[in-house]
Amino acid sequence: MVGRIGDTPIIGAGTYANHLCAVSATGRGEAIIRGTIARDVAAVMEFKGLSLKEAAAYVIDQVPRGNAGLVAVSSTGEVAMPFNTTGMFHACATEDGYSEIAIWDSPTK
């Protein structure tokens, strides 16, 4: 769309990885850039000592509703896919045989 800003190529905003986790964000680029949400997940893990799922949920709660989602994997293999939009296409498969393919939140979460 004309005038849209892409967050994906901006390290720290739409994508980030370090020794704790790897994060990829999706949604409205402007909100993701302003919140630097991919980097924030790693920072919250490091400085607050939260798990990946706790950190990802915390960061998504800080972004204005309806603007973002992310897929994140920790260095230990934990997966988090929170979003604050109506739905977000997301999927994962882990070494232990767990797999998930969804658009909306799982009722088991």
Image (spheres, rainbow, N blue to C red):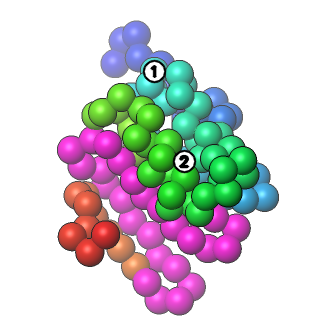
Residue indicated by mark 2 = 24
Left/right of residue 87 with respect to residue 42 in the rendered view: left
Label the magenta part by its dominant secondary structure: loop
> Type of residue at label 2?
Ser
Say which element carries label 1: helix
Q: Amino acid at mark 1?
A: Glu
| Residue 97 within the segment the image draws in magenta | yes
User: Which stretch appears magenta?
Assistant: 70-98
Q: Which residue is mark 1?
A: 30
Q: Is residue 72 visible?
A: no
Which x, y percent locates residue 78?
56, 71
Q: Magenta span has 80? A: yes
Q: CA gap, disc 1 to disc 2?
A: 15 Å
> Residue 81 vs residue 18: left or right?
left
The structure residue drawn at horizontal position 31% and vertical position 55%, both measured from the top left corner, is 89
Question: Percent position (x, y) of residue 86?
Answer: 21, 44
Q: What is the secondary structure assignment of the residue under circle 2?
A: strand
